[in-house]
Amino acid sequence: MDLDTKIDDAATYFGITFKEKQRQAIKYFLSGKDTFVILPTGFGKSLCYQCLPIAIGSESPIIIVVCPLITLIKDQVQKCKFSIILCFD
């Protein structure tokens, strides 16, 4: 399965359409490249990593997200608890 198909499958799962910068970040990661995403507030950076377990298709992929804001971490963990993503803060 090519990378664009994996990304499209993840978008379908979440019921969204990725913006081009999101697709680019996800594609870099899926290509095995170290990926650091800097985008404006409200752009949808969280979706860039929340979709990865779906796009990877592995039973238990491990994605590490580093965030300096405890409030944001707790918000992201709460959002992930309503999906198939197992997460910890």
Image (spheres, rainbow, N blue to C red):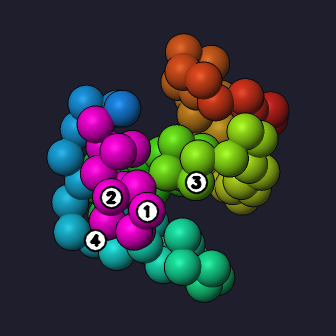
Name the dominant secondary structure of the magenta segment.
helix
* Mark before the other along the chain sequence, 3 or 2: 2
Q: State the residue at coordinates (25%, 30%).
A: 15
Q: Residue furthest top?
A: 82
How far is mark 1 from mark 3, CA to CA?
A: 10 Å
How far is mark 4 from mark 1, CA to CA?
A: 21 Å
Say the numbered circle drawn on residue 21. Answer: 4
Residue 70 lies in the magenta stretch: no
Say the numbered circle drawn on residue 56. Answer: 3
Q: Callout 1, which amino acid? A: Met
Mark 4: few/some/many CA within 10 Å (<14, 14-19, 20+): some
* Residue that mark 1 sits on: 1
Q: Which residues are magenta?
A: 1-12
Q: State the residue at coordinates (49%, 51%).
A: 55
Q: Callout 3, which amino acid? A: Ile
Report x, y in % for residue 52: 54, 51
Q: State the residue at coordinates (73%, 28%).
A: 86
Labels 3 and 2 touching (C-beta < 8 A): no
How far is mark 4 from mark 3, CA to CA?
A: 19 Å
Task: Indicate left or right for 89 with 78 as reference.
Answer: right
Mark 1: few/some/many CA within 10 Å (<14, 14-19, 20+): few
Labels 4 and 3 touching (C-beta < 8 A): no
Q: Residue furthest bottom?
A: 33
* Residue that mark 2 sits on: 5
Mark 2: few/some/many CA within 10 Å (<14, 14-19, 20+): few
* Mark before the other along the chain sequence, 1 or 3: 1
Mark 3: few/some/many CA within 10 Å (<14, 14-19, 20+): some
How far is mark 4 from mark 2, CA to CA?
A: 17 Å
